[in-house]
């Protein structure tokens, strides 16, 4: 048994960090929020292709773990790569070369990565259908750092517009839940790092504010929530391969834990920064926005909770 | 990253599972949990487990152990859990106190004490906390004064699990009040039947008495009962607390708790969406304790010492079990509090402080893991006698 990262996995993490450090995604996120003309978020799909991240197959040996690790790092930098949607699709449609996104049944609005994808894997009552001409438009202004799309299927003619895929959309759904959670955990971890750094530097009453228990305990409790969530992401990555009957439980448990950790953690990060944390210029609210929106996507934290209970009830 | 067994570990697991299949009929009916009333069946079971090598797996062979790894001990614990049978009766002795004697004791002490401890013939207790020193363990006031080549002990300990059953205790005492608090401590082994030792059960809010107060009135100890050098008691105590953390990592398996335990009694009463959401939170936290424990255990297996973050798992566990018990009571109605759920709910409020309060864990982890600065302190450098009491 070894349930910690190995040296190859740590290497992957540092290579993703290195690649993402070259682009100031946080500044871009703030500009995009300002709605400045031409201030779109950079699309990091090319970076993802160059890094080989788009080729990570969640069904291969430790594939989902690698996906989780890449997306945690993307989340730390609020870097939009299109990987949540794409990796969910290739988890059941191996070898697909085009940029793809997954549209689960009943979730056609605020779909991660749908607007930029070249093809969509749409889950219909009859099964998953691969289409390349659905109408998608960008939605949401609250957190423009991660593109979301509204998919209009009203004119879709399955026979003419798409190809049926013989695969289990439930697996893609669990992959999407896991990767979305990983991306959100990255934001929560970055928000904690920001707050810890600030709590060490900022002096009040003659000492660093991080020495006061009122601050120290809040930050350490955020560490607890983040680490719990990370453990469950590892469990999901492990289960996808080794305990498929528990993958649903693990993926939804991870999702539930992450959304809670990110909600609490990003709010605490703002609070520890005092008034500064509540200003437009500070990065704290960028992570906060990410957390507040993430917990509503793809069925949200509440949906994940419902599915955790269903899985345990059997 | 992998949870699957290596071929050797799989073989070990099969052996443990096979042995349990053949022997589990000898196990006491109830699980140990945190509190045992009639200890004799558990004592006999611990002997059987120890002779088969299922407790004290990491102990050296010369002291009756298996010389095995933490991972093997974890496998043994998880198989005990799977078989629905309790593990060692003296979890604290086997897990924390014995290994501390192994690390710091003399050869004579190891030969005298370790084997009977492992077999359950002699139960041990940990005599650290005092009425005026809990989180601040180094602030203890029980005195050991040199006397005719030996030591004379006076003072009081509290929250002492198993003191009523114990043959020996590991006692942290103050031997020098003229140096700063951490430097004036010494560790001893105390025979609990020695003249001047009084054990008084301490009834907890559950109504049960798992803890005790222990009083020392002019207890005479020969120098051979000292563990480590005079003034080195803090170092010995830290070793003990390090093993306690290690123990915490497999706490769920040792307590025999499953995330599902809160589901079964209320599975027909989950029509309300708010109850389902709260149940999800409890299940998720219980799973998180297990997998965070596996991560920490893997670090230890890779050669790292267990860090203070192990204590965070206990915070999650106590919080989750509290919410779980409340949820069951809400679903079943007030009568649920009359039985096991009321007991568990109460027990968790004590466990919140057991082995380190939430607050001391958060402080320690905040400083050691996040690197946050310590609070200014006057008590680290001043001689102990000058500290306000």
Image: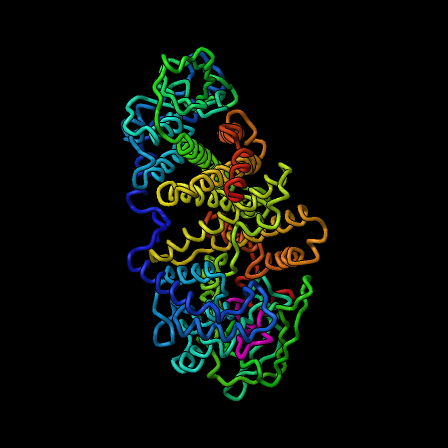
Between B269 and A212, the residue placed more toward the observer is: B269
Between B386 and B281, the residue placed more toward the observer is: B281
Residue B168 colored magenta? Answer: yes
Between B32 and B149, the residue placed more toward the observer is: B32
| Residue A24 in view, yes or no | no
Q: Is residue B258 left or right of residue B7?
A: right
| Residue B78 in view, yes or no | yes
Between B59 and B130, the residue placed more toward the observer is: B59
Q: Position of residue B149 (x, y in %)?
A: 50, 87
Give me the residue at 52% from left, 60% from top: B255
Residue B357 colored magenta? Answer: no
Give me the residue at 40% from left, 81% from top: B111
Give me the residue at 64% from left, 49% from top: B328
Position of the C terminus of chain B by quadrant: bottom right
Q: Which residues are magenta?
A: B161-183
Quadrant of the image occupied by residue B220: bottom right
Q: Residue furthest bottom?
A: B148
* B222 up-or-down from B51: above or below: below
Q: Position of residue B101 (x, y in %)?
A: 43, 74
Q: Position of residue A53 (x, y in %)?
A: 31, 31
């Amino acid at each position: 048994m070894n349930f910690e990262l190995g040296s190859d996995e740590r290497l992957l993490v540092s290579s993703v960090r290195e690649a993402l450090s070259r682009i100031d995604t946080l500044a871009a996120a703030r500009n995009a929020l300002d709605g400045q003309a031409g201030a779109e978020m950079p699309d990091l799909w090319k970076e993802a292709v160059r890094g080989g991240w788009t080729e990570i197959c969640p069904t291969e040996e430790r594939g989902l773990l690698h996906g989780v690790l890449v997306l945690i790092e993307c989340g730390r930098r609020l870097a939009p790569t299109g990987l949540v949607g794409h990796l969910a699709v290739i988890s059941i449609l191996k070898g697909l070369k085009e940029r793809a996104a997954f549209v689960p049944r009943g979730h056609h609005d605020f779909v991660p990565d749908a607007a930029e994808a070249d093809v969509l894997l749409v889950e219909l009552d009859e099964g998953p259908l691969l289409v390349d001409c659905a109408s998608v438009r960008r939605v949401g202004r609250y957190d423009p750092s991660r593109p979301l799309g509204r998919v209009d299927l009203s004119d879709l003619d399955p026979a003419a517009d798409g190809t049926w895929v013989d695969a289990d959309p439930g697996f893609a759904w669990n992959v999407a839940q896991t990767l979305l959670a990983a991306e959100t955990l990255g934001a929560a971890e970055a928000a904690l790092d920001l707050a810890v750094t600030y709590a060490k530097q900022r002096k009040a009453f003659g000492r660093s504010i991080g020495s006061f228990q009122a601050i120290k305990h809040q930050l350490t409790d955020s560490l607890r929530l983040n680490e719990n969530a990370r453990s469950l992401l590892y469990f999901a990555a492990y289960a996808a391969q080794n305990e498929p009957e528990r993958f649903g439980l693990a993926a939804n448990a991870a999702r539930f834990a992450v959304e809670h950790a990110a909600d609490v953690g990003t709010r605490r990060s703002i609070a520890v920064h005092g008034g500064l944390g509540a200003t437009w210029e500070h990065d704290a609210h960028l992570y906060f926005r990410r957390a507040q929106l993430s917990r509503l996507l793809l069925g949200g934290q509440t949906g994940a909770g419902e599915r955790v209970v269903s899985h345990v009830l059997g | 990253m992998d949870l699957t067994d290596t071929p050797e570990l799989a073989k070990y697991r099969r052996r443990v599972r096979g042995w349990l299949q053949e022997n589990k009929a000898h196990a006491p009916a109830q699980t140990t949990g945190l509190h045992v009333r009639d200890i004799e069946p558990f004592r006999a079971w611990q002997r059987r487990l120890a002779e088969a090598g299922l407790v004290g797996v990491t102990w050296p062979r010369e002291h009756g152990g298996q010389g095995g790894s933490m991972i093997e001990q974890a496998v043994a614990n998880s198989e005990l859990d799977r078989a629905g049978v309790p593990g060692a009766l003296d979890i604290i002795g086997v897990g924390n106190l014995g290994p501390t004697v192994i690390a710091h004791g003399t050869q004579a002490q190891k030969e005298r004490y370790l084997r009977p401890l492992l077999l359950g013939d002699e139960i041990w207790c940990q005599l650290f906390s005092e009425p005026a020193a809990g989180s601040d363990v180094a602030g203890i006031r029980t005195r050991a004064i040199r006397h005719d080549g030996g030591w004379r002990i006076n003072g009081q300990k509290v929250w002492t699990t198993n003191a009523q059953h114990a043959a020996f205790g590991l006692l942290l005492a103050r031997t020098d009040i003229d140096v700063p608090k951490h430097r004036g401590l010494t560790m001893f082994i105390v025979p609990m039947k020695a003249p001047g030792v009084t054990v008084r059960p301490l009834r907890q809010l559950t109504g049960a008495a798992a803890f005790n107060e222990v009083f020392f009135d002019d207890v005479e100890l020969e120098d051979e009962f000292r563990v480590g050098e005079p003034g080195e008691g803090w170092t010995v105590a830290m070793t003990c607390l390090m093993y306690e953390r290690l123990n915490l990592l497999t706490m769920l398996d040792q307590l025999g708790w499953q995330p599902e335990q809160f589901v079964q009694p209320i599975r027909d009463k989950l029509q309300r969406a708010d109850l389902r959401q709260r149940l999800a939170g409890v299940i998720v936290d219980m799973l998180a304790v297990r997998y965070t424990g596996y991560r920490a255990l893997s670090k230890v297996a890779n050669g790292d010492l267990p860090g203070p973050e192990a204590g965070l798992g206990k915070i999650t566990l106590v919080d989750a079990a509290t919410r779980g018990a409340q949820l069951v009571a809400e679903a079943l109605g007030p009568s649920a509090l009359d039985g096991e759920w009321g007991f568990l709910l109460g027990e968790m409020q004590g466990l919140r402080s057991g082995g380190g309060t939430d607050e001391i864990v958060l402080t320690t982890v905040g400083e050691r893991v996040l690197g946050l600065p310590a609070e200014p302190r006057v008590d680290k450098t001043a001689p102990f006698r000058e500290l306000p009491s």
